Amino acid sequence: KQEVTQIPAALSVPEGENLVLNCSFTDSAIYNLQWFRQDPGKGLTSLLLIQSSQREQTSGRLNASLDKSSGRSTLYIAASQPGDSATYLCAVYRAGTALIFGKGTTLSVSS
Amino acid sequence: DVKVTQSSRYLVKRTGEKVFLECVQDMDHENMFWYRQDPGLGLRLIYFSYDVKMKEKGDIPEGYSVSREKKERFSLILESASTNQTSMYLCASSSGQGSFGNTIYFGEGSWLTVV
């Protein structure tokens, strides 16, 4: 059974710092992986989708990488800002199932 | 922009009541989903649908049912609400009938409290 783990569960950094969020999954037979952002009390917003054939995707200050063989993905946030404070979730997709989510990393960026 | 609308943001219901949570999407997506999100447990899939009148059980379907009479609308029904169903419910949709790997769009969530 596919399991998705995100460590750490919470992270606090000062403004301006570059940071990395981690996501690991147990079954490497995935088709793609998505990263989401969730603000308190709100729904999820898709940030990046990486196909299994890709190694990374970039959007603005965000860069997501995928290493299928090792079952790992990272979300790199450059020059963090207080507005980046949110919970970040990753989810993996394999054929025949809906997305399987990790429990998220709650990021706090202080000014 | 894709919009997934959950009509009720906050609800308080009594134990034993029948509860309807409504979700509408405006992008002609084939796939729709209902998740619940609880602290420490993350998102758990309740039901999903890949076509009108089609439904599939997710990981935790017990105590719930769904209805998809029109493509744009996916309803979650709590047949007899219980306190352990107090949670945040999230509706989502994606394109690609039966293929669930495309970008998924979520609604704002419905906070349900059962007393």
Image (cartoon, rainbow, N blue to C red):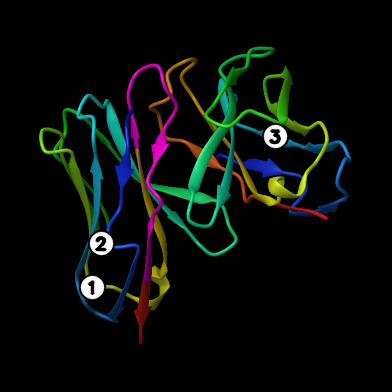
Element marked by disc 1? loop
Q: Which residues are magenta?
A: A92-107
Disc 2 to disc 3: CB gap under 8 Å:
no
Q: Which residue is mark 1?
A: A79
Q: Is residue B1 above or below residue A21?
A: above
Residue type marked 1: Ala
Disc 1 to disc 3: CB gap under 8 Å:
no
Q: Is residue B94 left or right of residue A17?
A: right
| Label 2 – label 3 distance at C-alpha | 32 Å
Q: Is residue A15 left or right of residue B34?
A: left
Q: Which residue is mark 2?
A: A61
Mark 2 vs mark 3: in front: 3
Residue type marked 3: Val
Disc 1 to disc 2: CB gap under 8 Å:
yes
Residue at 53 percent across and 57 percent down: it is B39
Which residue is nearer to you in this view: B61 or A63? B61
Residue type marked 2: Arg
Q: Quadrant of residue B51?
A: top right
All told, the count of numbered labels is 3
| Label 1 – label 3 distance at C-alpha | 37 Å
Residue B61 image position (x, y, % from top left): 62, 28
Which residue is nearer to you in this view: A98 or B8? A98
Q: Quadrant of residue A76?
A: bottom left
Local crowd size for mark 3, using a 10 Å CA cut-off: few (<14), some (14–19), many (≥20): many
Q: Which residue is mark 3?
A: B24
Q: Is residue A26 above or below residue B31?
A: below
